[in-house]
Image (cartoon, rainbow, N blue to C red):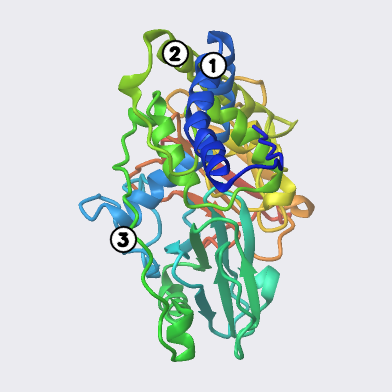
Amino acid sequence: MVIYLIREKGIAKNLQMRILSLLILLPILGYEDQKQVTTEETKAIAEEAYIYAYPMLDNYKTLYGYAIWEESPVFVAPLNILFNSTELRTPQDTEVVRPNNDTYYSSAIMDLRREPLVLSVPSITDERYYSFQLIDLFTHNFDYIGTRKTGFEAGNYLIAGPNWEGEKPDGINKVVRTETNLGLALARTQVYGLSDEDNAQEVMSGYDLQPLSSFLGTEAPPEPAALSFPPYSPEKVKSVEFISYLNFLLGTVKPHPSEIALLERFAKIGIGPGEPFDVESLSLETKGAIEAGIAEAQEKIVAEMANLGEQKNGWMLVSGSFGNREFMQGKYLRRAAAAMFGIYGNDLEEAFYPEATVDADGDELDGSKYKYLLHFDADRLPPVKAFWSLTMYKLPEQLLIDNEIDRYKIGGATEDLKYNNDGSLDIYIQKDDPG
């Protein structure tokens, strides 16, 4: 809504009344505008908004469980504290889909409202792969620190939120900016095998995350107002209540210029940064329209997962589904499907994710009925600079499968890997011991 203030001759008293009239009129106009939204438009907006919100909602599940709800079974550390996990992922780890069993994970849920954080990494002397994937609230990968992006040198990297206006301090290698005040630093440190665990842990001991004031030895800025994090509910995020979560999360970000019009459209059904949302105030017709929009959004997200990459030889070669704001701009359905497929996926430059759910005949993989063989010719082993691995997940959970030999992946770094006489490699995938 645009309001034009026309300059007229008049005494101050009249001018005050004109302004007062506008202040009274605006809420009434907004209310009337909202009442005029049709049922079909409400449904369409809800569908569009849910697709937009889905990655943020799934991200919030991790954020809330990892750093806010201390009774959570997956709680690891408060906000802005870096936690190093010194155990490889197993079937008991259920908080994130499609985990790998090749690296140790480190993580920190970042709150950048008060001041930037400084992430420090050590010098890597054994060419071990590591990466800190920096993820914003939308699930954009806004930058990387690690082997590929910054090399093996030690360094200090400043991570700043949307409201910080400082200059790069001395001792900082690079300033990394993000448009959201809440985010995730997710690190992966390669482990070559059980005999290498101590070496990997020594590398991790050199990681550090601290406020900028602590790094500089200066006084910290004033504490911002505490955020009232809404308790995460799997049921509520799939219902009309998703708007409550979205409004809270939008209140912690700087709106992107390209999305101003989109957010104005969403406002027609009660979506707005930091705005309260009362589901009880909705009419049954409006509530039903929003629920119908959510249902269609969920169907579209599931369907889009089949389009995340090229289909070739029974494999889906996932690409173009994870990236920074510029790369993912406007790809809201793709972003949502990628989050459902495997949230926190890496950019293609960092990792490549081929996946198979069918065999050579096109039938669905079923380990309870069949035995499978994956063959690599000697000259067709995965061409990688760090490592490759084949991991088996159970569906639909997309989690590691419990087994009696505790083997969840086979890869180039697997100990005692046996190649055929011609240099080729056969991997047996079955529930029975191949002998």
In front: 278, or 15?
15
The residue lying at 52 percent from left, 22 percent from top is 298
The residue lying at 61 percent from left, 72 percent from top is 165
- Asked if the residue at tag 3 contacts the one at tag 1, i.e. Cβ–Cβ closer than 8 Å, the answer is no
Across the whole image, how many numbered discs are drawn on residues? 3
- Report the Cα–Cα distance between label 3 and label 2: 40 Å
Find disc 1 in the rendering and name its residue.
42
Query: In the picture shown, does residue 236 fall above or below 322?
Result: above
The kind of residue on which mark 3 rests is Val
Task: Sort mark 1 into few (<14), some (14-19) or many (20+) by Cα contacts within 10 Å.
Answer: many
Task: Sort mark 2 into few (<14), some (14-19) or many (20+) by Cα contacts within 10 Å.
Answer: some
Element on which disc 2 rests: helix
The kind of residue on which mark 2 rests is Thr
In front: 397, or 140?
140
Find disc 3 in the rendering and name its residue.
76
Quadrant of the image occupied by residue 158? bottom right
Question: Where residue 385 sits in the image (x, y, percent)?
Answer: 71, 65
The kind of residue on which mark 1 rests is Thr
Disc number for residue 286: 2
- Report the Cα–Cα distance between label 1 and label 3: 39 Å
- Asked if the residue at tag 1 contacts the one at tag 2, i.e. Cβ–Cβ closer than 8 Å, the answer is yes
Name the image quarter holding the C terminus. top left
Q: Does label 2 or label 1 sit earlier along the sequence?
A: 1
Element on which disc 1 rests: helix
- Asked if the residue at tag 2 contacts the one at tag 3, i.e. Cβ–Cβ closer than 8 Å, the answer is no
In front: 186, or 424?
186
Quadrant of the image occupied by residue 330? top right
Element on which disc 3 rests: loop
Q: Is residue 254 visible?
A: yes
